[in-house]
Amino acid sequence: MWPQHSIGLLLVLVSGIVAFYALVVERDDLHRLLLLDLVEIPALGIIALLGTDLAEALILPGLVVGIAELLALSQIYLMKEEISDRRVKGLPIEVVRADAPLIISVILVIYGIVLSGFTGGGIAGLGVVFYFMSRGHREHFEMLEMASGISWAVWILGFFIFMFLPQYWVLALYLAAIGILIKVIVKMSLVGTMWGDAP
Amino acid sequence: MSGIAGIPYYILEFGDELVYLTPYTVTLLLMALAFTVLVILSRPERQVDIIFGTDACYAKETGKDELRFRRFMAIACGLACMGAMVTGDMFNFTLFVSLVGICNVGIVAAVRIRHVQEATFQYGIVALAATVPLFGAAALVAASTGTLSMVELWKEATPAVPLAVKALLVLGVMGEGMAPFYAAKAEMFRAPGAPYVIMCSLSSLLIFLRVIEIVLAV
């Protein structure tokens, strides 16, 4: 392999050992949960070291699996410690109560739409997550879920055009980019509304 | 071209997706399929506790919501298992295995008893930490051989996968396959709603059997 890859692997290995050591030493369950998020990073680092298109395609499912397990574990933690009845509505921080979340979210969403595709969806979604998390929410989410489903179907349609009608690849590219952008934004904003209410 | 699992009956290549059926993988697939069908058909057991020395006994019912959630998780676990059995793509295999891990967490977590939740949480931590060697191994296979397809990896021309990478893969599968130990620790096998918990054991058995084939073949 090329030397950069070996050096990178060594760095990832060292950080992985440090993170796992912390995980072994730590006794508090909440802190272990937080450390796990840290442990995930070296795994993504190993994949990212591939440095090709394939790496991006592989990181995304890895990231999704990590987030899914983390959400599931935090729900279990709430249930286990019997604190799931404590409802939290927004972050009680003065800056967050002012206009800061709105401005930051708008910047992130605009930048995400400019980027488009999965990365753009991730960034724009992060903006929406931040807004929902800092403001709380009262809306119904059927519309958001429907938008997510339709945009997913659009994304799949784009893929089928790629495979069966390759001459229309520009159309397929736009369909896939827009579909995944909307889908990721909506999915992430739904994550932002999860304030640990009991399932 | 035959792997350790025998001569393939059928290889499906569709873009990145690669599925192959050999006598070995078909056997495992049928096991997973049969058990998923059993899970769909079966009703949860009602556990009866008898108080020693008296006539008193009480039956524990499984609520309808809990039943539906656990059945859904068990079926999802069966589907993930079937995917892990037939996939011919290294990364898809690791994804399916981690999906099995998440479903196992779900199956066990549906029981609202404190010590069961405690065990689930500990298993979840192990399963989540195990995704690191799992995905790391898949990425290192791609880095050291240039392909993730097992059909390519069987060929003599492809460089062999380093032993350390295989060890990482097995370590990851071991972490995800830990569910029965934690289920036993929480005495899940005696908790109400019996058939679904067996899915934990079966899925870990199947992913262990499959990873042996992969490690020997590539």
Image (tube, rainbow, N blue to C red):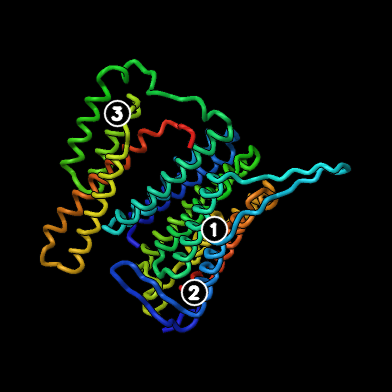
- Contact (CB < 8 A) between labels 1 and 3? no
Asked whether, in this view, residue A198 is left or right of residue A174, the answer is: right
Q: Nearer the viewer, residue B99 or B88?
A: B99
Observer able to see residue A127: yes
**For mark 3, does the 10 Å Cα neighbourhood hold few (<14), some (14 to 19), or many (20 or more) residues?**
many
In the rendered structure, the residue with mark 3 lies on which chain?
A
**Residue drawn where x is 28% and y is 33% of the image:** A128
Query: Residue B57's spot in the image, x, y percent?
Result: 78, 44
Tell us which disc is closer to us: 1 or 3.
Answer: 3
Q: Which residue is mark 1?
A: B171
**Residue drawn where x is 32% and y is 42% of the image:** A187
Reading the chain from its start, which is encountered first: label 1 or label 2?
2
In the rendered structure, the residue with mark 1 lies on which chain?
B
Amino acid bearing label 2: Thr
**Residue drawn where x is 11% and y is 58% of the image:** A170
Q: Relative to A146, say whether A56 is above or below.
A: below
Instruction: Describe the element under mark 1 as helix, strand or loop.
Output: helix
Q: Which mark is residue A100?
A: none
